[in-house]
């Protein structure tokens, strides 16, 4: 009897090991150009300025920031402001670097798709990183953001910070976008949902990020 139970447990464990080994979806990263001079590489929490072109699997282009003559886009890396595949694929990148990212649906727009993107689309992006700035996760930023002496950030303080960042980098003010960015930061950082981001919540690096 004991042996039967043991072998049962054994096969259950074996089954879970096999399930655990299913391949994780990955972003395929190809570096197309790496600049000679690289002062720093992008990491989670940094703000990145990027130009990008997006392609469907059949090679049709569905978005091009340059062709549309649009401005490059600022994003904060690692806070799901963009698709997961970007958060993963834009790490350790130098300013001036160009990459080709091939992103499976589960790390892009998944089963639902979005707008022009049909469900279950594998997407290819040509991305050029124009500039890297300290994002709101660094310790200096925390001190800068905390306008009073209470060592926690209120919604007002986060919004003011985002607004200042826009001014500093010469970007046209955009209330909606700034509001969204502040809300995003709050959503991710205020872990205990008490309406404030403590210095601990702020600097702690979450596994999923
Ligand atoms: C390529 O794929 C996209 C998305 O599935 C589709 O909208 C488009 O019509 C396709 N283009 C060609 C030339 O097949
Ligand atoms: C402001 O940002 C929102 C959200 O990203 C965007 O839809 C809108 O076009 C922007 N407005 C201007 C004036 O740039
Ligand atoms: Ca404060
Ligand atoms: Ca909190």
Image (cartoon, rainbow, N blue to C red):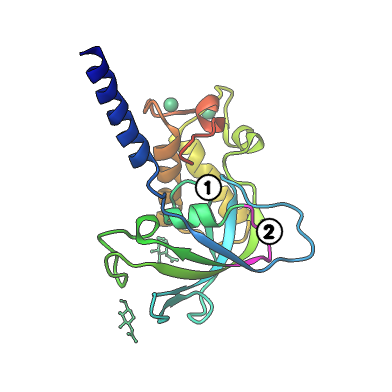
Residue drawn at the location 42% of the way across and 31% of the way down: 190
Count neighbours of disc 2 (C-alpha within 10 A) and say few if under 14, some if 14 to 19, many if 20 or more. Answer: many
Q: In the image, which disc is placed on residue 162? A: 1
Count neighbours of disc 1 (C-alpha within 10 A) and say few if under 14, some if 14 to 19, many if 20 or more. Answer: many
Q: Is residue 113 left or right of residue 90?
A: left
Residue drawn at the location 55% of the way across and 22% of the way down: 150
The quadrant holding residue 149 is: top right
Q: Is residue 111 above or below residue 57?
A: above
Q: Give the label, 1 or 2, closer to the camera.
A: 2
Location of mark 2 (residue): 94
Q: Is residue 114 above or below residue 158?
A: below
Magenta stretch: includes residue 66: no
**Residue 139 on image: x %, y %:** 64, 34
Residue drawn at the location 39% of the way across and 25% of the way down: 192
Give the position of the N terminus as an image quadrant.
top left
Q: Is residue 23 above or below residue 171?
A: above
Q: Is residue 99 above or below residue 147?
A: below
**Residue 128 on image: x %, y %:** 60, 68
Q: In the image, which disc is placed on residue 70? A: none
Residue at the top extreme? Answer: 2
**Residue 197 on image: x %, y %:** 47, 30
SS assignment at label 1? helix
Q: Is residue 23 left or right of residue 133?
A: left
Nearest the viewer among 182 and 131 is: 131
Looking at the rendering, the stretch of residues picked out in magenta corresponds to 92-99
Mark before the other along the chain sequence, 1 or 2: 2
Label 1 residue near ligand 2, CB within 8 Å: no
């Amino acid at each position: 009897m004991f042996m039967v139970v043991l072998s049962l447990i054994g096969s259950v464990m074996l089954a879970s090991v096999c399930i655990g080994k299913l391949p994780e979806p990955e972003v395929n990263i190809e570096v197309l150009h790496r600049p000679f001079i690289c002062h720093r590489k992008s990491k989670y929490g940094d703000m990145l300025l990027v130009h990008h072109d997006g392609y469907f699997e059949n090679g049709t282009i569905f978005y091009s920031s340059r062709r549309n003559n649009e401005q490059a886009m600022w994003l904060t890396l690692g806070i799901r402001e963009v698709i997961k595949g970007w958060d993963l694929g834009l790490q350790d990148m130098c300013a001036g670097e160009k990459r080709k990212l091939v992103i499976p649906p589960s790390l892009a727009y998944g089963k639902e798709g979005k707008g022009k993107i049909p469900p279950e689309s594998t997407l290819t992006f040509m991305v050029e990183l124009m500039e890297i700035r300290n994002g709101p996760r660094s310790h200096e930023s925390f001190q800068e953001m905390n306008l009073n002496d209470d060592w926690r950030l209120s919604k007002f303080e986060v919004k003011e910070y985002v607004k200042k960042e826009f001014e500093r980098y010469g970007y046209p003010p955009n209330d909606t976008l700034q509001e969204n960015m502040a809300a995003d930061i709050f959503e991710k950082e205020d872990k205990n949902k008490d309406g404030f981001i403590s210095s601990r919540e702020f600097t702690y690096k979450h596994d999923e990020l």
